[in-house]
Every structure is written in structure tokens, then in C-alpha cells.
Image (spheres, rainbow, N blue to C red):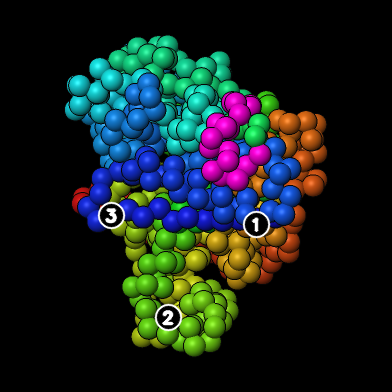
């Protein structure tokens, strides 16, 4: 990677949603920041746009946002989600996802209901990827994997579902044109190119949903490959080769999403806690360690890893502190720390938290096996990929080799690969991967550790079910 530049979105206290203009301003700042680091900036030929999903903004024909960006975390659209579930239209089987207020469609429905005047000026509902593409080049195009996050996309037909949209009171004209990953949407506006430091004629490329981008950038490009991304949310994205939209699969809250590689699909197995739970432990349980870390010139996680005991303990953590993730997708829920004794200390709890997150991923892996979705190895991305301790733990608990990537931001690499293929620099993503994907250390599972974890995992599953039963009473 030649350059990277990040801008943290600043949200005002009490602000609902995200400000679309502020978001685009941050995107422009990130592009300028990268361009300024590249010596041969005049040779830049394309910008690929990928993003998280489900969040959207309504715009008029001038591109003006008519409301703040509606975030997937806002919890709106519950009644509309129920209406979609009760609809005579088989929404899940068409969209490859069970109706949930996480997705954009039910919240679009609610927005139109709550703001009846909106429809007078509404031109398009755009998710983040196609909104940025539109602002950069004036065209509205959304790649298949991001379109899936609206809950109105026909996964088999690779188009918007007229049936679903009609039942929701929307029409295809309110949304962007679905395109394959890597499709050139247009060229950057001439005036904007100068402001960004880009040469004229730079192509704007539709990238992909962030999880597909991470899988692509990690080199998970064939059946049996999988990537584990650990940020605030931890997600395993396995690759398979058939359309799966049966009711049982969807009832487990798994999805079927087109991969960037034609003919392949991915699903998402995730826990909402992930790295966020470790951040909670760092900030709320051991805040005193920040001063020690600063004095040592290291991170708090470095100190925690140094003090982490070897071997397993009797402490079991069910990591549902922020909700469950798949397969239940339950919120609210609560986590559990069980097995504490007079000999328990903070380092033991820290290790148990990481073990609990690994056990949650193993639980998902076992569920996916029921649908013949399996993986023989994992590639690790995100902040968690920088922890050898955690990567070895994942390998031991899941029983597969786990390989760290030299470039932790695999999503950015995936976008670059898609852009390079779209411009003919490479003939395929597989060829691009041979140049872009750089692997680091591989962590092999230990038979001895796997046996210990196997016994502890059986206890984890029992505690997990008990915790969920208690959560039902909240």
C-alpha cells in the first residue's frame, strides 16, 4: 500500500444520523490526504468506492440531502419490518436475507410514512457507496453486494425486485442502478478533480460492501476460503458457490450475497461485540493501565497481552454485551462472566473475554456446517489481526490455520483490486491478488490446546443458552 489516510467522522452530541455533506467532505479529505502521499499522483487512474451497508440518505434531483443519513443502528422500521414478514411476497427468498430493521428498505418505508412531504422532492434513496459515487461523478450506480443490504434486491436475478418494492410502496426509480463489482460508473467531475489533486479523467468505480471488500482484499476468492475481520464487530465471511435462500438458512439470520468473483457467494457470521468488548474492558475495567502504557510507549493491549496467563481457566465469558449477532440477532441481550473464584484476577478475565469471542465464532461455524458451508483456513484482517495471542487462540478454538495479512486494511486492498481489474491492469481478481495480497505469519492449531478448548466450549454452549433464556425476560 503506497498511502493511507483516515478521517474520523465527528458527530455532535445528541445528533441523529450522519450529516451527508460532512461525510462527503471527510471522503474528499481522505482522497486528498492519500493523493498528497503519492509521488506519481498524476498517474492515478481510478478511485473505487466501498462502504458499510444499510445506511442511506434521501436526495433531490440536485443531489441535496433531504434528511440526515439514516444509520443501520437507529432501530427504526420495526413495524415496517413486521409488515414485510407478513407480506405475501417471499421477501427473504428473493433478497437472500430475512426481514430485519437493520436493512434499509423498512426504514425507507418508515421515513416516507413519517415525512409525507419527502416524496414531493425525493429523487433517490442512496446508500453510502452510491451516494459517494454520485457526488464524485454524477452517476447513480450501486454494486450487487451493497444493493443486497437494502432488502429489495433479487439476488438470483441481479436486479431490484419489482415485487418487493411494490409491496413496500417504492419503485425502482427511487434507487440506483445495480451493477457488478468493479463497474466504472463515470469520471470524476472536472472541478472536483482539481480540488482533490487528481488528474482529469480519473474513473470512479463501484466497489463493494465492506465485508466483501475485506474478503476480496484478503484473497478469499474460492470455495472454502474465509476471512475473519475484527473491528468493533467480529465477522467471518466464508465463500461458497451456490445460491442459498431456503427458510431455515434465513431463519438463522445468515444472508446470501454475491461475491466480487462471478458465480461465488458469501455470508456473514458475526458477533456484535467483537473488538468493542475488548475496548470496553480496556476503558471501563482497566482505565488505570493507560498511564502505564503511555509511560512504556506501547498500547494498553500490549500490556494486557504480556500479563495474559497461559492455558485456559474456569472463567467463561458469553460476549453478548452489545447484542448477539448471528444466528439469533437479538437485541437487547446481555453478556455473562461466569466461573469467578477468589483466585480470579483481571488478566484471567481478559483472556476469558478473548476465548468467549472465539467460542462465539465457533458456534457460528458449527451452524454454517449444517448448510454445508465450511472453511479450511482463515485470513485475519482488522485490529484483531495485530494480536498474535488472539490469532493463535482463534486457530486453536476453530481448528484451522489462521494467517495474518501484512496489510491490515484488506477492504482498501479489495477496492484497489477491483479498480485495477476494471481498467484491464489485471485479467481477474485472482491475478490481482497475486500482486496485492501479502500474507504474514500463519498460526497453526495446537492439538493439545484444541482438546482443552473443546471441553470448555461444551460448557460455553450450555451457558450461552442459559444467558439467552435470561435475556428473553429483559
- Number of the front mark, 1 or 3: 1
Q: Earlier in the sequence, mark 2 or mark 3?
A: 3
Vertical side of 440 occupied by 192: above or below: above
Vertical side of 68 occupied by 63: above or below: above
Q: Write the start and end of the magenta stretch as one range.
A: 182-199
Q: Position of residue 458 (x, y in %)?
A: 49, 59
Q: From the viewer's side, name the closer residue of 73 and 223.
A: 73
Q: Residue at x 47, y 61 (%)?
A: 275
Quadrant in the picture for residue 387: bottom right
Q: Residue at x 38, y 67 (%)?
A: 280
Quarter of the image where the N terminus is located: bottom right
Q: Which mark is residue 37?
A: 1
Q: Is residue 5 left or right of residue 333?
A: right
Q: Position of residue 356 (x, y in %)?
A: 47, 62
| Residue 184 visible in the snapshot | yes
Q: Earlier in the sequence, mark 1 or mark 2?
A: 1
Q: Residue at x 48, y 36 (%)?
A: 132
Q: CA distance from mark 2 to mark 3?
A: 26 Å
Q: State the residue position of label 2.
A: 290
Q: CA distance from mark 1 to mark 2?
A: 32 Å
Vertical side of 256 occupied by 213: above or below: below
Which secondary structure, mark 1? loop
Q: State the residue position of label 3.
A: 12
Q: How many marks?
A: 3
Q: Is residue 219 left or right of residue 257?
A: right
Q: Is residue 256 left or right of residue 63?
A: right
- C-beta proximity under 8 Å, tags 2 and 3: no
Q: Which mark is residue 129?
A: none
Amino acid at each position: 500500500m503506497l498511502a493511507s489516510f483516515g478521517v474520523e467522522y465527528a458527530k455532535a452530541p445528541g445528533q441523529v444520523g450522519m450529516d451527508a455533506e460532512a461525510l462527503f467532505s471527510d471522503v474528499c479529505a481522505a482522497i486528498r490526504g492519500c493523493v498528497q502521499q503519492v509521488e506519481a499522483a498524476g498517474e492515478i487512474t481510478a478511485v473505487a468506492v466501498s462502504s458499510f451497508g444499510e445506511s442511506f440518505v434521501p436526495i433531490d434531483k440536485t443531489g441535496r440531502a433531504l434528511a440526515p443519513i439514516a444509520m443501520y443502528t437507529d432501530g427504526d422500521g420495526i413495524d415496517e419490518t413486521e409488515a414485510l414478514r407478513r407480506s405475501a411476497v417471499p421477501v427473504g427468498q428473493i433478497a437472500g436475507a430475512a426481514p430485519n430493521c437493520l436493512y434499509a428498505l423498512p426504514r425507507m418505508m418508515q421515513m416516507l410514512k413519517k415525512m409525507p412531504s419527502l416524496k414531493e422532492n425525493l429523487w433517490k434513496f442512496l446508500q453510502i457507496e452510491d451516494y459517494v459515487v454520485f457526488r464524485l461523478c454524477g452517476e447513480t450506480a450501486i454494486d450487487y453486494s451493497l444493493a443486497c443490504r437494502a432488502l429489495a434486491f433479487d439476488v438470483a436475478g441481479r436486479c431490484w425486485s419489482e415485487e418487493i418494492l411494490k409491496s413496500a410502496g417504492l419503485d425502482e426509480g427511487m434507487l440506483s442502478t445495480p451493477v457488478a463489482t468493479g463497474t466504472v460508473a463515470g469520471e470524476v467531475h472536472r472541478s472536483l478533480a482539481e480540488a482533490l489533486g487528481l488528474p482529469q479523467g480519473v474513473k470512479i468505480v463501484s466497489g463493494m460492501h465492506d465485508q466483501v471488500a475485506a474478503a476480496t482484499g484478503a484473497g478469499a476468492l474460492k470455495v472454502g476460503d474465509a476471512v475473519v475481520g475484527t473491528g468493533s464487530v467480529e465477522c467471518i465471511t466464508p465463500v461458497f458457490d451456490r445460491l442459498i435462500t431456503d427458510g431455515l438458512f434465513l431463519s438463522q439470520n445468515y444472508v446470501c450475497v454475491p461475491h466480487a468473483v462471478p458465480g461465488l457467494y458469501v455470508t456473514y457470521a458475526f458477533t456484535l461485540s467483537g473488538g468493542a468488548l475488548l475496548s470496553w474492558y480496556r476503558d471501563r475495567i482497566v482505565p488505570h493501565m493507560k498511564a502505564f502504557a503511555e509511560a512504556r510507549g506501547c498500547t494498553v493491549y500490549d500490556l494486557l497481552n504480556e500479563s495474559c496467563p497461559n492455558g485456559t481457566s474456569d472463567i467463561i465469558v458469553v460476549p453478548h454485551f452489545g447484542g448477539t449477532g448471528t444466528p439469533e440477532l437479538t437485541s437487547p441481550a446481555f453478556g455473562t462472566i461466569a466461573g469467578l473464584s477468589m483466585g480470579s484476577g483481571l488478566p484471567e478475565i481478559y483472556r476469558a473475554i478473548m476465548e468467549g469471542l472465539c467460542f462465539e465464532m465457533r458456534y457460528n461455524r458449527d451452524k454454517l456446517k449444517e448448510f454445508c458451508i465450511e472453511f479450511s483456513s482463515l485470513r485475519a484482517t482488522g485490529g484483531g489481526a495485530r494480536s498474535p495471542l488472539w490469532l493463535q487462540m482463534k486457530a486453536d478454538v476453530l481448528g484451522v490455520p489462521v494467517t495474518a495479512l501484512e496489510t491490515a486494511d484488506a477492504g482498501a486492498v479489495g477496492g484497489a483490486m477491483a479498480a485495477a481489474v476494471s481498467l484491464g491492469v489485471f485479467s481477474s481478481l485472482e491475478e490481482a491478488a497475486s500482486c496485492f495480497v501479502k500474507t504474514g505469519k500463519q498460526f497453526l492449531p495446537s492439538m493439545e490446546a484444541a482438546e482443552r478448548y473443546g471441553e470448555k466450549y461444551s460448557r460455553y454452549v450450555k451457558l450461552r443458552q442459559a444467558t439467552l433464556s435470561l435475556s428473553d425476560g429483559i
